[in-house]
Image: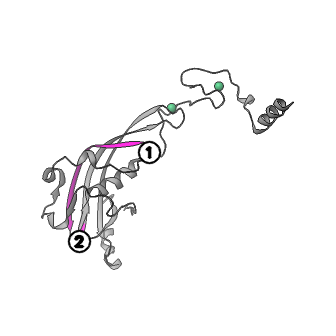
Amino acid sequence: MVFSILFLLIFGEVRLLYIRTSDISRGGFDVVASRGKEWIPGVLEGMNAHPLRTCRMREVTLFLDLEGKDLEASGSFSAEGEGECDRCAEPVTVGLEREFRTVFVPASRDPDETGDLELRPGDLDISFYDGRGIEVADIFWEQVALALPTKVLCREECRGVCPQCGADKNRSECNCQGETREGPFDVLKTLRKEKE
Ligand SMILES: [Zn+2]
Ligand SMILES: [Zn+2]
């Protein structure tokens, strides 16, 4: 049994597409089929996508279903973002994709009632909501945050820039030697020489 608890939900920050639990019919609610796709390009607006500079949503699927007061969200997304390589500072485009299944339980739920969550099958995430409805942007912000890279590299073997001369080591070899690297004492020596 694998499930993790997510605490990233941002309540009430964005109002893009709010779905009330009363909108969710028996048998579930396909958000894209019933509310269209117009909201998708704007869903990540205002999100801090660090370490990416920008991030846009391209495609999503989202299906909502109720089991009692628990709201189950299953879906997927693909997004694209831009950042800079940590080593050489070249611009990098990063694709993000993820499938998810999250159960939102009412935040006011009696702790004794959460026991049955452990009886649910599979790999699912547990999160919280107010029991009345859910902002679709909140669901996707949480999922995109989980998919963001910790570090941006143009490629795994990027050699970065020379700390001494600034040359891009992916393009050319420079003549700097590791051992001639200037330490703080070298800077002092240079200063002294300049004074003399
Ligand atoms: Zn690089
Ligand atoms: Zn160099």
* Residue at 51 percent of width and 33 percent of height: 89
Spot occupied by residue 56 in the image (x, y as percentages of width and height): 32, 43
Q: Give the quarter of the image for residue 23.
A: bottom left
Of all residues, the one furthest to the front in this rendering is 195
Asked if residue 130 shows in the view, the reply is yes
Q: Is residue 182 magenta?
A: no
Residue type indicated by callout 1 = Pro
Q: Label 1, secondary structure: give it.
A: loop
* Residue at 44 percent of width and 32 percent of height: 91
Which label was assigned to residue 149?
Answer: 1
Please give the residue where the numbered disc 2 appears in the rendered image: 69
Judge by depth and name the residue closer to the eye, 131 or 123. 131
Say which label, 2 or 1, has the lower sequence index: 2
Q: Is residue 63 magenta?
A: yes
Spot occupied by residue 72 in the image (x, y as percentages of width and height): 25, 62
Residue type indicated by callout 2 = Lys
Q: Magenta part of the protein: which range?
A: 52-70
Q: CA distance from mark 2 to mark 1?
A: 34 Å
Ligand 2 in which quarter: top right
Of all residues, the one furthest to the right in this rendering is 196
Q: Is residue 84 above or below residue 7?
A: above
User: Which quadrant is the C terminus positioned in?
Assistant: top right
